């Protein structure tokens, strides 16, 4: 059976298993996997590397101009790359996690990420996940899935994910971050 060239949007709260599910689905269908949250994390890492996030988590006005120089993409395995270098481990740290919300809230950052997602999704055959992906970013996606989980399950998933990466984290810190 031939699968149509569609965009599949997997939406839901953080740490509900969106990424795990979307990656498996993309692999099964032979589609490209795109993680919108990873793009926001990459943008945040970029801002951190450029020294554009202040101590109070506000972002320098220079960031808007610098953002156009960011080359962010996904490889065939769905890993996030900056300037063709895989940055999956760097974007999943608590340092990035603690600053991604103020960066993602900037309208020009949202425009940048949405534009990149639309460029990468041209022609379909894409499974992507992220909050608001099926409602705001791709409201006309061929298939939309919304995932949920209890707060405790979400915190447990995130805690295990960070522990598996060798990070020494506190469950209360993880809950606060969620």
Image (tube, rainbow, N blue to C red):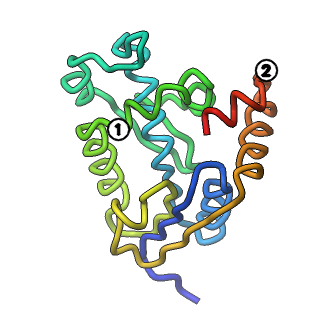
Task: Using the image, determine if residue 56 lies above or below residue 140.
Answer: above
| SS label for mark 1 | loop
Residue 165 is left or right of residue 118, and the answer is right
| SS label for mark 2 | loop
The N terminus sits in image quarter: bottom right
The C terminus sits in image quarter: top right
| Residue position marked by numbered label 2 in the rendering | 168
Q: Residue at x 60, y 61 (%)?
A: 22
Task: Using the image, determine if residue 116 lies above or below residue 173.
Answer: below
Where does the image place residue 91, in percent across and percent down from the top left?
55, 30
The alpha-carbon separation of the residues under discs 2 and 1 comes to: 28 Å
Q: Residue at x 31, y 51 (%)?
A: 114
Q: Looking at the picture, tell me which residue is in the foreground, 21 or 148.
A: 148
Mark in front: 2 vs 1: 1
Q: Residue furthest bottom?
A: 1
Residue 57 is left or right of residue 177, and the answer is left
Task: Using the image, determine if residue 119 lies above or below residue 103.
Answer: below
Q: Looking at the picture, tell me which residue is in the foreground, 72 or 164.
A: 164
Place residue 177 in its image quadrant. top right
Q: Which mark is residue 9?
A: none
Place residue 5 in its image quadrant. bottom left
Q: Residue at x 32, y 20 (%)?
A: 59
| Residue position marked by numbered label 1 in the rendering | 105
Q: Residue at x 69, y 33 (%)?
A: 174
Where does the image place residue 166, in percent across and percent down from the top left?
79, 24
Residue 140 is left or right of residue 156, and the answer is left
- Marks 2 and 1 close (CB-CB < 8 Å): no
Crowding near the residue tagged with mark 2, few <14, some 14–19, many ≥20 C-alpha atoms within 10 Å: few
Task: Using the image, determine if residue 139 lies above or below residue 153.
Answer: below
Q: Earlier in the sequence, mark 2 or mark 1?
A: 1
Where does the image place residue 161, in percent across and percent down from the top left?
75, 39
Where does the image place residue 150, in percent across and percent down from the top left?
72, 57
């Amino acid at each position: 059976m031939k699968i149509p060239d569609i965009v599949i949007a997997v939406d839901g709260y953080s740490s509900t298993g969106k990424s795990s599910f979307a990656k498996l689905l993309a692999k099964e269908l032979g589609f490209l996997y795109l993680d919108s949250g990873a793009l926001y994390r990459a943008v945040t890492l970029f801002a951190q590397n450029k020294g554009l996030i202040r101590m109070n988590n506000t972002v320098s006005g220079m960031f808007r101009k610098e953002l156009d120089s960011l080359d962010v993409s996904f490889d065939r395995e769905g890993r996030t790359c900056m300037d063709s270098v895989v940055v999956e481990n760097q974007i999943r740290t608590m340092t990035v996690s603690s600053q991604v919300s103020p960066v993602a809230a900037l309208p020009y950052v949202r425009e940048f990420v949405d534009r990149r997602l639309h460029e990468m999704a041209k022609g379909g055959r894409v499974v992507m996940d992220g909050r608001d992906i099926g409602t705001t970013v791709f409201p006309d996606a061929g298939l939309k899935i919304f995932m949920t989980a209890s707060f405790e399950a979400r915190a447990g998933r995130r805690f295990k994910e960070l522990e598996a990466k060798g990070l020494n984290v506190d469950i209360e810190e993880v809950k606060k971050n969620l």
